[in-house]
Image (cartoon, rainbow, N blue to C red):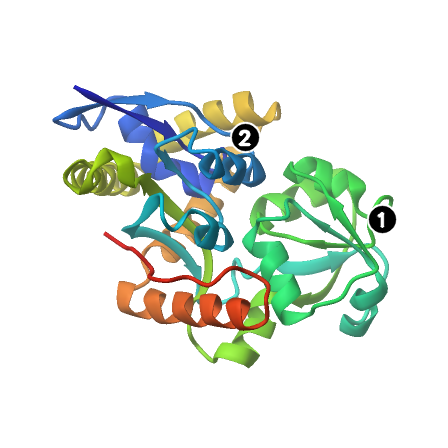
Amino acid sequence: MVTIKVGPLADSGDLYPFIPLIEGKIKPEGFNLEFEVIPTVQDTNEKVLKKEVDVAVPSAAMYPYIQDDYYILGNAIASAIDGITGMPVISVSPLSPSDLRKARIIVHGHNTTAYTLYRLLIGKYGKLVIVKRVLDEIKALGKEGDALVAVHEIKMMYALEKLGIKVHRVTSMWDLWKNLAGNLPMPMGTVVINKDLGKDIALKFKEAYEKSKKYAEKNLDEIIKKDAEIMAEAQKEKMDEEIIRKTIWADIQEYNVPLEEVMKGMEMFYNLTAERGILPKVKKIDII
């Protein structure tokens, strides 16, 4: 029997659909699952580039590099539609959007959607600072870097408040994207599956993932407790369950945008980034 290597991302909003599968609440038929929780988005991006996992949650910006090797699950694409999780750019000292072009900018990886959107929508910066983990990004703000593209916004604001750090909101990727793309969804992340498994197995996994996601959304209290355990182990930091709940609710909105609208946003994102030489050209968005 085929074994699928699954690499859920240790971020509550991306992790919750996998938890019923991890816990055996949903039992797929026709294949086995092997899990490795991946601590950061950049680590995930690197693993799919090397094909070290069959299923993972890479940045939407990673897809042009892996388009020949992975399908995107059509029921597992995260897109911003209202700015709630729209990647604000924050700073400790007051900055204007034009100041960002000379500032030290913190992002959590070269291949991330956050960095790609920054290049597309703002372009220049004084220095790029890569910090993979959310809490380490916060510690670097105002020291190693002047401004931060806040991807895990709810958790980040909670952590900043706990540390007593007050920040300024300079702008957001969502505000800038909306000026460019209107009301089209802004691509953020995807769940992908290795094409080497074959389309039949890929579709069976998609079905199992959907069942797992629905179970999680109907049983949030149960899922949040396990989410907190997994996050604490992967991130070496205890996370408040109420913050996990808020993060999951925000991501439920992101993962349930109608596919037709999601596709329009992705097409615009990939066309613009290819035209401007930021990402390789996408031949076809291969969604199952």
Q: Position of residue 105 (x, y in %)?
A: 76, 54
Q: Is residue 79 left or right of residue 123?
A: left
Q: Position of residue 96 (x, y in %)?
A: 80, 71
Say which residue label 1 marks: 142
Q: Is residue 87 above or below residue 42?
A: below
Say which residue label 2 marks: 39
- Along the line of sight, the residue nearer the viewer: 287 or 191: 287
Please report the residue visible at 69 percent of the width from the left and 70 percent of the height from the top.
Answer: 122
> In 3D space, how far apart are the residues under numbered discs 2 and 1 (Cα atoms)?
24 Å
Please report the residue visible at 55 percent of the width from the left and 72 percent of the height from the top.
Answer: 177
Please report the residue visible at 54 percent of the width from the left and 24 percent of the height from the top.
Answer: 234
Sequence-first tag of 2 and 1: 2
User: Which of the image's four quarters has the N terminus?
Assistant: top left
Q: Is residue 40 above or below residue 103?
A: above
Identity of the amino acid at label 2? Pro
- Along the line of sight, the residue nearer the viewer: 93 or 277: 277
Q: Is residue 172 left or right of residue 96?
A: left
